[in-house]
Amino acid sequence: MTVLCLLETDAGGGISDASVRTLVVARELAASAGADLAAAWFGPTEAADAGVLAGAGVTSAWAVGPDARYAPLAWARALSGLANGPAAPVSAVLAAATDHGNEVLAHLAAISDLPMAANCVSAAATAPGEFRLVRQRWAGSLLEDAVLEAPLAVLTVAADAVPAEMAGMTAQPDAVRVEAYTPELADGDQLVMAAESAERRSGVSLASARVVVGGGRGVGGAEGFAVLEELAGLLGGVVGVSRVVTSEGWRPHRQQVGQTGTKITPDLYLACGISGAIQHMAGCQGAKTIVAINTDAGAPIVSKADYAVIGDLHTVLPALIEAIKARSER
Amino acid sequence: MEICVCVKRVPMVGGAIVVTADGMDVDVTMSGFTVSPHEECAVEEAVQITERLGGTVSVLTLGPPDAAGQLRDMLALGAGRGVLLETDGAEWGPVATAGAIADAVRDGGYDLLLFGNEAADTGGYQVPVRVAHALGLPCVTGIKRLQVTGDGDPSGIVASREYRGAEEVFELPLPAVVSVKEGINLPRYPSLPGRLRAKRATIETVVPQPGAEGLRKAGLRMPEAPGKGAQLLGSGTEAVPALVGVLDDLGILP
Ligand SMILES: Cc1cc2nc3c(=O)[nH]c(=O)nc-3n(C[C@H](O)[C@H](O)[C@H](O)COP(=O)(O)OP(=O)(O)OC[C@H]3O[C@@H](n4cnc5c(N)ncnc54)[C@H](O)[C@@H]3O)c2cc1C
Ligand SMILES: Nc1ncnc2c1ncn2[C@@H]1O[C@H](COP(=O)(O)O)[C@@H](O)[C@H]1O
């Protein structure tokens, strides 16, 4: 048996953090089932470093092509073809719970007449065709223990399920062999296909940023964000915001952190003027360290953070920026 | 344009989620009910489209009799017609839900079926895709910008979203299935006349048959919240040296 992971690659042979998390959960599942770990991605064979894959425990891999443009149904068809063809017998297909992963696996489940479980944090095989899962509800504010009965488990892995690090994941010299795979598509599978618009937003994305400087109602208005931008720039990070900030129109919605925004997994989340509502925390519970700056020592964020500064963000942040600048000039 | 928007009744969560004593449900004895912000945006988008191009917005929900309340909330925002697929209140899974929705809309003559990207409570991320396959329609999910194309006679849509820092654009012919995310628009507040009309509106009711589900809930629990209780670094600017120390330890200072 094989557990097959759909991977997203980064330019330069890397695997996205979300896909590393998928491999971590898939490796546990494979171990529980006595199955092998396999990987597939869309793009050239060299798009993922074969040594890194081997280090992650992957024993076979397929690069799907030659047409690797994103078309959700075509991608699902390709995974189905792999699972029933060169990768067979497959007991589970996993992908990261991203826009692509959730969409492709929903298509896979629909065309294969299978159930699907989104946002899993762990999975184990308990019997042939039976799995025990833990998955997120309410964007991770609540966990569900679930039983999945299916000949093939279709699972997506939550963005904050596990740290994006794998014990023993070091590039191996005896790399896995990567084979090219060309799927047989049905008519209309590529009817819905992404065209990438010319306006590519440059810079670090919120979902993958190592540092996020968060601003909430306490920032007080659109102008107030200049100081957060300056600090984020200084630390090589980005600005994230609460829902109040986007519904007030102070900042665009794509910067929203939380249940109906983006899930972030930075090393540092510096939450300024944010109260720490449950829907906001659902988006930042994957942060390694949370530091809150808030005028109210009784705000919920203060009990949920690792560190807190009680004070006005508009005096604390400028002083912090000065201190950091002074330090790096030393 | 004939548009149908699917919304789901979910508990309104305030400070914390409470699980019932048997560990199987969310305790709703003290809570109100609402729909996901994604779905509210789907209704707003549909209303805006019909304001421009004419047509009707229908709203549909599968849920207990009280879910008629959420349909009325959506009627107050400008939807014209409400359909309730009435259940006994037990939780339906995504496979059965999609089957019942597909049956209900199959002969409705809709140009566009709009959904939220995911239900706020169960977060299944699949009902719209399953409905699309059941009806043989093209589908795209997680959309944050939507435009109807075709002069006078709507024939397609251009839908886009941001993915890993780039804008992805999809073109679909109508009829089509689209799920949207909060941020696609800012939903309006219900008007007083809207509220009155919604109160008087009749809700059409259909009773669907439940179906089998391969994914079974065994129990619900709270994640182990570190509940750390932050270490206080101090007040105001006097906390800055300690704060710099924390950032230094994290290795993120330039
Ligand atoms: C279904 C649903 C989904 C939701 N999804 C999201 C989501 O994705 N993301 C999200 O963020 N919210 C979401 N919310 C909203 C959420 O419940 C809160 O309303 C929101 O997060 C509050 O934003 P806030 O912390 O900025 O504002 P507030 O709760 O008003 O908090 C402002 C904080 O700033 C502090 N403050 C004020 N002035 C200063 C100052 N000068 N210096 C320092 N501190 C100061 C105050 O003490 C307070 O703690 C959702 C709600 C629902 C119902
Ligand atoms: N019970 C329901 N009634 C109506 N629409 C629903 C229901 N459940 C899910 N949906 C729709 O399908 C979307 C995705 O749901 P899900 O796949 O369950 O996460 C939701 O945002 C709704 O638009």
Image: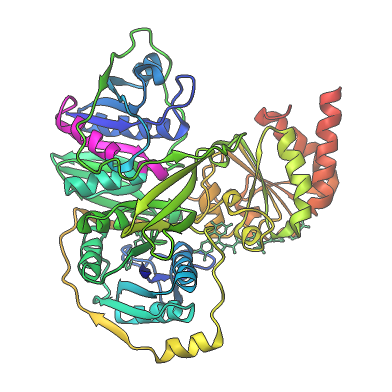
Q: Along the horizontal axis of the image, is B51 left or right of A181?
A: right
Q: Along the horizontal axis of the image, is A232 left or right of A163?
A: right
Residue B217 appears in the rendering: no
Q: Is residue A305 above or below residue B114?
A: above
Residue B6 appears in the rendering: yes
Q: Nearer the viewer, residue B30 or A150?
A: A150
Q: Is residue B51 above or below residue A330?
A: below
In the image, what residue occupies the spot 44% across and 35% down? A18
Q: Work out which residue is located at the far top of the displayed protein and give it.
A: A173
- Looking at the rendering, the stretch of residues picked out in magenta corresponds to A74-101
Q: Quadrant of residue A152?
A: top left
Query: Could you tell me residue A109's position as x and y percent?
Result: 23, 47
Residue A82 located within the stretch drawn in magenta: yes
Tell me the quarter of the image containing the C terminus of chain A: top right
In the image, what residue occupies the spot 55% across and 83% down? B191
Give the image quadrant in which the ligand numbered 1 is located: bottom right
Query: Could you tell me residue A164's position as x and y percent?
Result: 46, 32
Query: Could you tell me residue B137's position as x and y percent?
Result: 26, 55
Q: Quadrant of residue A63?
A: top left
